[in-house]
Amino acid sequence: MRKNIVAGNWKMHKTHSETIALIEEIVLKKQNTSTEIIVAPTFVNLQTAVTISEGNNITVAAQNMHQAEGGAFTGEISASMLTNIGVNTVILGHSERRAYFHETDALLANKVDTALKHNMRVIFCFGEELKDRQINNHFNVVEYQLRDALFHLQKSDWSNIILAYEPVWAIGTGETASPEQAQEMHAFIRSLIEKVYGNDVAENVSILYGGSVKPENAKEIFSKKDVDGGLIGGAALKADDFLAIVNGF
Ligand code: PEP
């Protein structure tokens, strides 16, 4: 059975003290839920986030990671640096990493391999730009992104993969894919996985939707059959909004 997951990508927001305050508020206000709650603060605050989250059913994820085991890569963070402080989940391929830091699917394939080698879970982000959707090329774009970054994996690797479909035109824009558009793409993604890896992998992989999910629209998006949760940006920065989204299931 696949899991429902709501993950907050905090991006370059929240200082150390703000990180403590936000996680403490989430811990205080959250209700019992079978939905996995993930928070992804910036690197410098991960260790503190792990300490406060421990025993509170909150998973801490990193927002990025380097593909090399270590070495002369100034400013970068390795998989073992993350796992050593108890961070075992990493977001890879976010559209901001692709757009501003030129991350390609080939590079992301390496990052995914490194993360899996370290037994980490990967939240793999992908999605089309507006120009692709306008010319009805969005299914092709998504198929190529998955093929180039993930379809070299073994069947067994998929237990550590979480997919996050994030149409770029919906990220941070206030514009959301309609629940029907999300469902249509999620069903397409699941059918692709089924074609390559079979029904058991397809049925067990969680596919999150990301792009301007808010308390007002979460419930309807999450009600769709192939939507297993959300990757949340802006609305993850306030405990009440984030928890209202979590409660959308
Ligand atoms: C994101 O950055 O992954 C995201 C979905 O952002 P927002 O919710 O702000 O659109």
Image (cartoon, grey):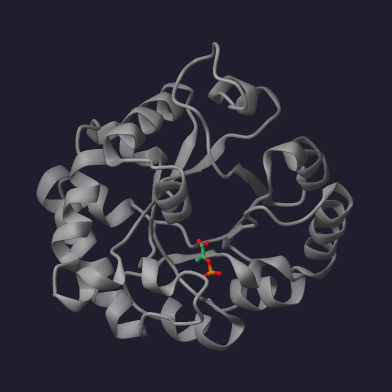
Residue that extends furthest to the left in the rendered view of this protein: 195
Do we see residue 67 in this rendering?
yes
Q: Residue at x 38, y 66 (%)?
A: 168
Q: Is residue 60 above or below residue 225?
A: above
Q: Quadrant of the N terminus?
A: bottom left
Q: Is residue 85 above or below residue 145?
A: above
Residue 210 image position (x, y, % from top left): 45, 67
Residue 33 image position (x, y, % from top left): 64, 66
Do we see residue 32 in this rendering?
no
Question: Viewed as shown, does residue 92 lie left or right of 225?
Answer: right
Q: Is residue 41 above or below residue 112?
A: below
Question: Viewed as shown, does residue 158 lie left or right of 43?
Answer: left
Residue 151 image position (x, y, % from top left): 20, 39
Q: Nearer the viewer, residue 15 or 216?
A: 15
Residue that extends furthest to the top in the rendered view of this protein: 71
Question: Viewed as shown, does residue 79 lie left or right of 192?
Answer: right
Q: Residue at x 62, y 70 (%)?
A: 234
Q: Is residue 112 above or below residue 123?
A: above
Q: Residue at x 52, y 71 (%)?
A: 172
Residue 31 image position (x, y, % from top left): 73, 70
Question: Viewed as shown, does residue 7 lie left or right of 157?
Answer: right
Q: Nearer the viewer, residue 78 or 12?
A: 12
